[in-house]
Amino acid sequence: MLPIFLGVFICVGALIPAWSQESTPTNPVAIGTPLKSMIELGSVSANIYDITITNLEVVRGQEALARIKAASASNPAPPAGMEYILARVKFELRGRYASDTMGMNIGDTPLQWVALRSDLTELVKPEVTAPAPALVGRVEPGKSIEGWVAFTVETGDAGPIMVFDPDTGGGVGRGKTEFFRLYK
């Protein structure tokens, strides 16, 4: 009887979608790996929405500087000892019910996407125009947004991390802070 129960349990478990790895500051999600999580939208009657965030690509150093300069000639060079790093991110939002129609603003607050040094201290986000398309806009349920976000990191730092925090900037997107690699 036990083998039959275990067989059924394994088969049913295989039908449930697998969630991506748990993201932590010491175990950030790898580039190209989708991370599934949840956020709560709504200030009075909140609903849970599913999100998927994928850091699709990372560009660093001279190539990132060239892309930032091409986006706007007025973009400055990075400070001494620092270099630019760009992340191309895809953010997907899914409602759980037909009544889930609330959208979410992405990239409209400087603290929603931040970079950390490998020692987990926060880096100052540069005030530059990111390459098009920038990761800024409103995403509605069932839709996604994709774009570039720019950071500066120390030239010798081999393990910087990107952080998504849905609770920043007065937003109503309460959820778990997620961590992504900005290195291979």
Image: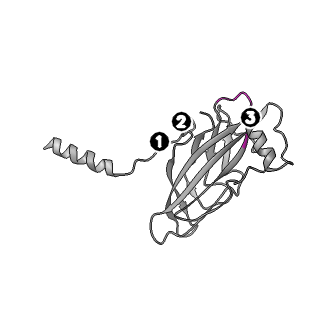
Q: What amino acid is labelled 1 in the image?
A: Gln
Secondary structure type for disc 1: loop
Type of the residue with mark 3:
Gly
Among the two numbered marks 2 and 3 on one chain, the one whose residue lies closer to the N terminus: 2
Task: Answer whether labels 2 and 3 touch (C-beta < 8 Å).
Answer: no
Q: Earlier in the sequence, mark 1 or mark 3?
A: 1
- What is the spatial separation of the Cα atoms under label 1 and label 3, in whole angstroms? 28 Å
- Residue 111, given in percent of the width and then of the height, sits at 69, 50
Q: Residue at x 32, y 47 (%)?
A: 14
- The quarter holding residue 24 reads top right
Label 3: few (<14), some or many (≥20) within 10 Å? some
- The residue lying at 54 percent from left, 38 percent from top is 30
- Residue found at x 68% / y 49%: 148
**Residue 62 on the magenta span:** no
> What residue is pinned by disc 2?
27
Expressed as whole percent of the image width and height from the top left, the position of residue 124 reads 75, 42
Q: Which residue is mark 1?
A: 21
Report the quarter where the C terminus lies.
Answer: top right
Disc 2 crowd, CA 10 A, few/some/many (<14, 14-19, 20+): few
In this view, the residue in front, 14 or 71, is 71
Q: Are marks 1 and 2 in contact (CB under 8 Å)?
A: yes
Q: Nearer the viewer, mark 1 or mark 3?
A: 3
Question: For residue 32, what is the image quadrant?
Answer: top right
**Residue at left offset 48%, top offset 42%:** 22
SS under mark 3: loop
Image quarter of residue 137: bottom right
The residue wearing badge 3 is 61
Amino acid type of the residue that numbered disc 2 sits on in the rendered structure: Asn
Q: Secondary structure at mark 2?
A: loop
Closer mark to the observer between disc 2 and disc 3: 3
Q: Which mark is residue 60?
A: none
- Magenta region, residue range: 151-158
